[in-house]
Image (cartoon, rainbow, N blue to C red):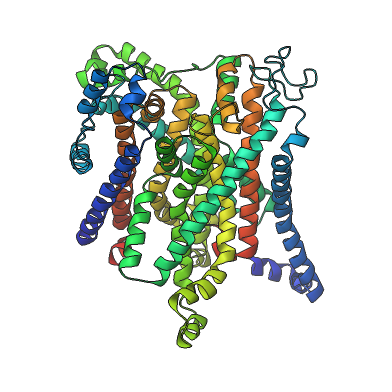
Amino acid sequence: MVQYIIRRLLLAIPMLLGAMSIVFFAMRILPGDPCMAMMGDEATREALQDCVRNLGLDRPLVVQYVDYMWKSLQFDFGRSLMFRYSVASYILSMFPHTLILVLSSTFVALLVGLPTGIFSALKRQNPLVDYSARIVALLGLSMPVFWFGIILLIVFSLYLNLFPLIGGGDLTTVIEMISDGEMFEYPQDFLAAILDVLHHLVLPALALGFTLAATVSRLSRSAMLEVISQDYIRTARAKGLAERVVVYKHALQNMMIPLLTIIGLFVAIALTGTVLTETVFTRPGLGKMLVDAIGARDYPLAQGAITVFTMTIIVVNLLVDVLYAVFDPRIAYK
Amino acid sequence: MALADQTASGGAAARQAIPTEQEWLQGLRGRRLRKLIPIILGLFMVLLMLLAAIFAPFVSPFSPSEQFADYVLKGPLSGPHLLGTDEFGRDLLSRVIWGTRVSLQVGLGAVVVGFLVGVPLGILAGFVSGWVEAIILRLTDMLLAFPTLLLALIIVTALGGSLFNEILAIGVALTPNFIRLARSLALTIRENDYIMAARAIGSSPVRVMARHVFPNAVSTLVVIATLYIANAIRTEAGLSFLGLGVPPPTPSWGNILSEGRQFIQCCAWLTTFSGLAIMLAVLAFNIMGDALRDLLDPRLRGE
């Protein structure tokens, strides 16, 4: 087991380095000088040279590459061209917004997707149930999250005026109050701040959650179908257990293991979804930051955001693989 | 459970439960028909889109760039404008019809790129083990660390937004999926006796891969490719929505939606109809791909 985990860890390192190299070289073939793009045509020669020197673009490519790799691993992505402060601190301030969006939309996706997937697998003999579940899943799979988000905004924010149109709430205050211990001194303010954050979170989480639910539903359906045809399920039925017990005690617990492997894939989809979701809801976060950085040609910021996205996905995949081996020890010996 | 029911309700019911040959054939035909309905539905929608894209100049009531000064931001069914107009007084229906071109071109083009690059590499990786396989697989793993939209976004940012670059970017982003699929197919196919026979009579590895492995993998690959068209269309819409797709004034569903976003307070039809078009297009390819997969390759069902 330990051997497997070490091997998996070692495998993740070249992947991480490779993915970071792809980011580096993709940003490097950017048409035109990032400095020129940033400052426009009226920039003086001196200003341009200054910018090039600040970004270190005058150095040989190999030096830039090694420098980028080394600093990125230390979470140093340089300074943003737009905001003048360090990319790492900006990413850190944005990360919680994206994290709560991913977590809450995952919650929605599981809440909707798991039961429908399991139900449609168990009732697959009933074409009405199976077909309607599959049609709903197909619709969810085909509906772009940014469109669903806009529909939600039109209905719930504009017409019903229930939720805010833009923003992500004052998450910074909440985090500060937690870290300062002020949450106990001013419980009312703390509660108000949390409610504000949740108020901003509802629509984005629903939009992203429902589109992700389709994926969860399909995957849990096939996981359930796989488990339900196993011998131990037949044994459980043969010894006369109630169908309810068979499903809840035997099938459900075992279908969670194959479902676990797709969490990595799922996080990747969810993170991509945040790029579009945050843009639609004008919500602060990594995805919105990436889009804005690309729009403004803020090249260190964009590079930092993409690197963090990739790092997160690789690390999550690594964790999932390790967890998988813990839950299902057979994996480690393959 | 079924057996218990039969014995409980007596011999007559048991005899009835076993279908005659004719009934069995009818049942089979019924199942076939039920599987054919989604394919026909999906095919019909795809065909409709293809026709709309090819004959856009003839089908659309107006030019997508013609500006009607009297009809700025007018709702659906106002005057001759069936779906309303945008902020420049351009006819929305015409723009949505012309947008079909971008979506289909990118959807089909990107999948062709991914297929042409990914399938040969995948078959090679599945057929030749050793360092070739290792290099291809490691590269695939690296690219797979990026979700499709993110990878396409990086490439489009690097190359600049245009129809061709979008096709290229999404095509490259889809490639690792094709490599993985083609490799896993090649791994099963190469165990067959006919591969050994072909090798025994002295066929070169390239010939075996091209004449024996590829033809046996192609039906599955094409079916899965249909599903990736849906994926590519959705990714294109996402890129256009983020302002990284085909530059305006060329209409694409994503940029109509993105421009319409500023006017959701007054004019929700702009975002509603362009989004609906995206959803129906993606749905059409998803339905068709799903049904084809069920019909042609039961092994992949439920994946």
For residue B274, above or below residue B84? below
- Looking at the image, residue B178 sits to the left or right of residue B105; the answer is left
For residue A220, above or below residue B52? below
Residue A91: x %, y % from top left: 29, 28
Q: Nearer the viewer, residue A241 or B18?
A: B18
- Looking at the image, residue B70 sits to the left or right of residue A329; the answer is right
For residue B296, above or below residue A248? below
Q: Measuring 25% from the left and 48% from the top, which residue is drawn there?
A: A17
Q: Nearer the viewer, residue A328 or A43?
A: A43
Locate the N terminus of chain B and report the quarter of the image it occupies: bottom right
Q: Nearer the viewer, residue A7 or A27?
A: A27
Residue B134: x %, y % from top left: 32, 64
Tell me how many marks there are. Answer: 0
- Residue A190, image quadrant: top left
- Residue A330, image quadrant: bottom left
Residue B110: x %, y % from top left: 53, 48
Q: Measuring 31% from the left and 34% from the top, which residue is drawn there?
A: A303
Q: Is residue A152 visible?
A: no
